[in-house]
Amino acid sequence: MLIAGVGREFIIKDTHRGLWYEDGKLAKVLEAGRYKIPPRRRWLRRLPTVECLLVDVRQRELTIKGQEILTADKVAIRVSILVQFRVTDPKAAVHTVDNFEDRLYSDVQLAARRSLASMTLEEILTNRTRLSEDILSDVKEAAAGYGAAIRRADVKDLIFPGNLQEIMNRVLAAERNSQAQLVEARTRAEVEQIQAQSRAEAVRREAEAEAAARRVREQADAEALRVHAEAETLAYGQRVKAAEALEAHPALLRLAELETLRELAKNANARLYLGLDRNGLRLDAAVGEHNES
């Protein structure tokens, strides 16, 4: 937007910058603020003719539409590219080229053609970011020369020939199907692995439990043997002490015999067999129990 006219006041917003011309020569670049076009004469002295050109410095978008390009494997595709840019140097944007937007359009178009022509169809489908990277590296320096900075350049649309579109749909469907089968196979393998690990863990725990039970049984058997042996040792010691007491005191043996006879007398079926020797009656070792039935 060109602003002219003596005495005209205008405001430049933060979204723009102003190129201040005096007699057609750029004098300065105006920042945001309020300005006024000065008069052409003062005190009979002629002053320069002033004009101000406003340049938009906001980020903008530029769409390169419907570019039909042959890929490296000779497939014709139509591609649309969305470019985001902004003017960083108003002076260069206006003075270096006739129209910086048209120039940027041409530069991005040619860069996209060079990039896509070096890529196969498969590479284009699987790696669209390469196109953006190629355009940025190819155009960034040139655009900076006429005051524009490219932020990004992305593939917006890809249009294939009709028969190729059908083939690509089949390929994509087959890829999705194979990926689903691969995921299913991996899931099944993981489930089988988990089940095998669970079975192995169960067997291991069962073996550990059985070994622990066996150790407990062995310890119990050993303890029982030890207690039995201690009991037998104690009983043997008591018998030894009893024998020694009877040997030292024969009267105790006689008392034991009488106690035995008293207990036998309580049983009606008990029989006592006596033996005789030359010196008279003596008790023999023939004591028993008779059942009349």
Image (tube, helix red, strand yellow):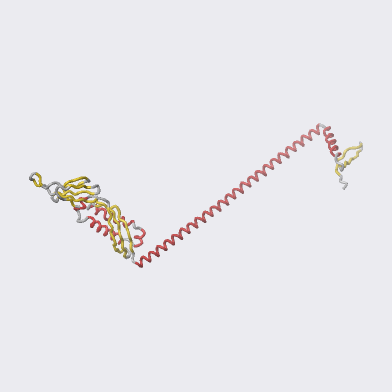
Using the image, determine if residue 110 lies above or below residue 279.
below
Which residue occupies the foreground of this view, 208 or 141?
Answer: 141
User: Residue placed at 34% from the left, 58% from the top?
Assistant: 128
On the picture, is 2 further left or further right than 122? left
Residue 239 locus on image (x, y percent): 77, 37
The residue depicted at 67 percent of the width and 42 percent of the height is: 223
| Number of numbered discs on residues | 0
Residue 99 spot, x, y in % from top left: 21, 56
- Most distant residue in the bottom direction: 163
For residue 272, what is the image quadrant?
top right
- Residue 64 horizontal/vertical position (percent): 28, 59
Lateral position of residue 110 relative to residue 274, left or right: left
Q: Residue furthest left?
A: 44
Rendered view: 258 above or below 121: above
Quarter-of-image position of residue 98:
bottom left
Is residue 208 or residue 142 the one in the foreground? 142
Q: Residue 30: x and y, percent?
A: 20, 46
Left or right relative to 208: residue 175: left
Residue placed most toward the observer, 189 or 254: 189
- Tell me: 96 left or right of 198: left
| Above or below: residue 106 compared with residue 289 | below
* Residue 201 vs residue 103, the one in the foreground: 103
| Residue at x-position 29% and y-position 52% | 151
